[in-house]
Image (cartoon, grey):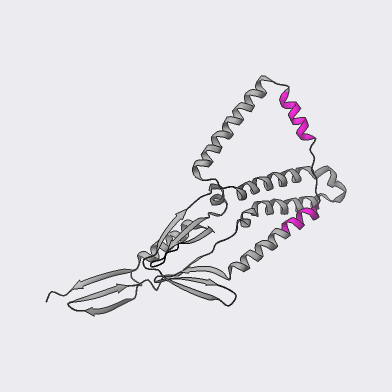
Amino acid sequence: MADDHTSEKEAGSGDMHIATNDGLDPVFLVSYPKIVFLYPTVLVALFGAIYMWAMGNEAAEDYATMPARLFLITLMVNLVVVSFDFPRTTSLTWFFATVAVCVGLWTLFHLNVELAPWITAQLAKITPKANAAFYLIFALSILFLFTCVILSRRFDYWEVRGNELLHHHGVLSDLERFSAPNLRIDKEINDVFEYVLLRSGRLILHPSQERRAIVLENVMFINQKEDRITKMLGALQVRVRHDHS
């Protein structure tokens, strides 16, 4: 690389050229808890708060059902994503199962025309309601937890450099160092929906001369992080040139 710093060392009958990648920016790896995947519910809660505030308190009983249903459906789906893992194979299985159920229901309703209106009428009787204060308190509570999580990650993160792997942890910034040139990285995307929400996945780091693997869950934008680490470690080149004279 054009920006690489080169150091030379004479060794017997040959010269060793080591090209390092000091010019590359370090890659920071942060492992997040699964609560960060609740941001769609927070957005819907903020929408509900704004919607109910715009409608006014006197019209709350008439307009409260729609945002409440949307909030509950989003919350339920969000909790399913957080509670279970959906690998590629499992996701395909669930997709085909959902298609089969939809086809079965369509056939049932087609053969029993009066059944669909009855079910619709029963569902219409379920009228959940909530005011703007409820949505706002829920959204602010989760946002407060998000802030706490982000602040806590400032005291526990990993930094990948061209020649070393650093673990920053603790209030006083305790530091652990691992050798990076022989670092092996495994990437796993165990949940399709979590990847869709935050492009997140699991990174498994195998430092040289270390028995234990370092597992980082829920690393955001995992593909970009992996590409940067691969380029960084690949930029370290060792060449041996023999002098035949």
Residue farthest top in this picture: 111
Q: Nearer the viewer, residue 74 or 79?
A: 79
Does the stretch in magenta take in 237? no
Does the stretch in magenta take in 125? yes
Q: Residue at x 60, y 31 (%)?
A: 101
Q: Is residue 220 left or right of residue 146?
A: left
Give residue 204's position: percent from left, percent from top. 46, 59
Q: Quadrant where the N terminus lies?
A: bottom left
Give residue 220's position: percent from left, percent from top. 53, 58
Q: Is residue 75 left or right of residue 212?
A: right
Residue farthest right in this picture: 58
Q: Residue at x 62, y 49 (%)?
A: 83
Bounds of the magenta segment: 115-139
Give residue 173's position: percent from left, percent from top. 55, 76
Main SS category, magenta section: helix
Residue farthest front in this picture: 211
Disc tally is: 0
- Residue 35 vertical position relative to residue 169 in the rendered view, above or below: above
Q: Residue at x 38, y 68 (%)?
A: 209
